[in-house]
Image: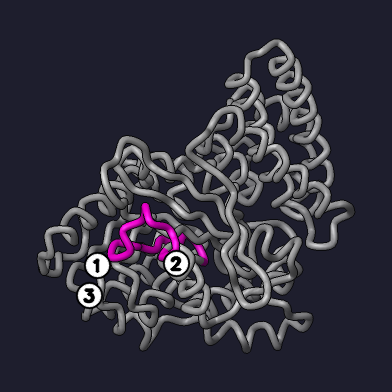
Amino acid sequence: MFEYFPGNYVWNLGVVATLNSGGYIDEIDRACRPIRDAATRGEDAGTEEFLASWTAVVDDLVDTADRNLAAGHARTAGRTYARAANYLVNAERMQSADAPDRNAIYRRVLDLMERSFELADPLTRKVTIPFRDTTLPAYFTRPTNVDGPTPCMIMWNGLDSTKEHMYFSGFCHELARRGIATLMVDCPGSGEALRLQGLTAQIATEEWAAACVDYLETIDTIDHDRIGLVGWSLGGYYAPRAAAFEKRLALCVAWGANHDWGKVQRRRVDREGERPVPHYWEHVMWVWGESDLDEFLARADAVNLDGVVENITVPFLIAHGENDRQIPVEYAHRSYEQATASPKRQLRIFTAEEGGAEHVGLDHLPHVSDFVADWVADTFTELAAHPQPATTVAGR
């Protein structure tokens, strides 16, 4: 993995994720160069400096976009607002849960996203999914030039990403080019649902899945028999759990196999493996609505797919990097081995030689994204023809 800040995995992960999600290397270099010394102090120290340096680049981009818009260059302005949002949401992600003005920063991200959609991406819009007595915020990207109802993928994020990260990955547009819509959802415990609505994570993710499917079934342009679910990082637990019990889902993808997330937490207490964000324990307890570490760890033990993936009865893809330093590759094999009721299960391990070997393939995100998009498109085509595909051998 490219290391702008040698020895600081967490900061490097953020840089690489941004580069592989539409960031420009010159702009990211301008954001990172002033904080190289700060990065040597560890993953937690210096995150406020990180935010300040990246925000300075964001402010410059917004000024540039404003001038482009005034000059009548709407598409250029929209794309520039989008890059500003990309940098700002990645800098916001690095902050502590109680960082000053964190919600105001995130609201600025939402505003920049709306401007970018209006000016540069008419395929995407913000939507809200009814959930309990509130809503789940989401982005919906539709395909073009498609006759009849289209299949749709619900996309869920993980512990520290947001629907904006999912959008900037470009996965929704790859699916759109394959005739598939995408619903990118801030689940409880993530993004706008956590920050602005106070919705925290839960073990029974099938409740979220039911809400998403209910919403999509109100849209006439969606093929209600071909609704799938993909989750990355902690979504590699959320999505398989949901697919095991929400039987209206037609397929499932674990983009990073989070089979025993509770065990991962106990390894992190012992400083085994890498962490995804600074201020880790503060962040993780914020996501799950806990205030005591021991109580959180006891609850996290139940975030486990043993006895769950056996109930997945639809096509199931597990994509994992062989050098994932957060989630051991053994969990990908465990999910595959236990998903015996799936009529089409596949395990795809990405190697260092090809790229995509790090956590959720962030070191070569487009490579992994293309593979997942092709698998989804092929499987939806098979489902349209009503075949019963055989289980495939683990591996490529």
Residue 159: quarter of image: bottom right
Label 1 packing within 10 angstroms: few (<14), some (14-19), many (20+):
many
Residue sitting at x 47%, y 78%: 206
- Secondary element under disc 3, as helix, strand or loop, is loop
- Give percent across and percent down for residue 231: 45, 62
Label 2 packing within 10 angstroms: few (<14), some (14-19), many (20+):
many
The residue singled out by tag 1 in the image is: 315
Q: Amino acid at mark 2?
A: Gly
**In contact (CB < 8 Å): disc 1 and disc 3:** yes
Mark closer to the observer (2, 1): 1
The C terminus, quarter of image: bottom left
User: Of label 2 and label 1, which has the lower sequence position?
Assistant: 2
Name the disc covering residue 342, or none.
3
| Residue stretch in magenta | 217-234
Compared to 174, does 256 lie above or below?
below
Q: Looking at the magenta stretch, what is its main secondary structure? A: strand
- Secondary element under disc 1, as helix, strand or loop, is loop
- Give percent across and percent down for residue 8: 65, 47
- Give percent across and percent down for residue 369: 38, 45
The residue singled out by tag 2 in the image is: 236
Q: Nearer the viewer, residue 176 or 317?
A: 176
Mark closer to the observer (3, 2): 3
Compared to 163, does 345 lie above or below?
below
Residue sitting at x 42%, y 55%: 323
Label 3 packing within 10 angstroms: few (<14), some (14-19), many (20+):
many
Compared to 253, does 24 lie above or below?
above
User: Of label 3 and label 2, which has the lower sequence position?
Assistant: 2
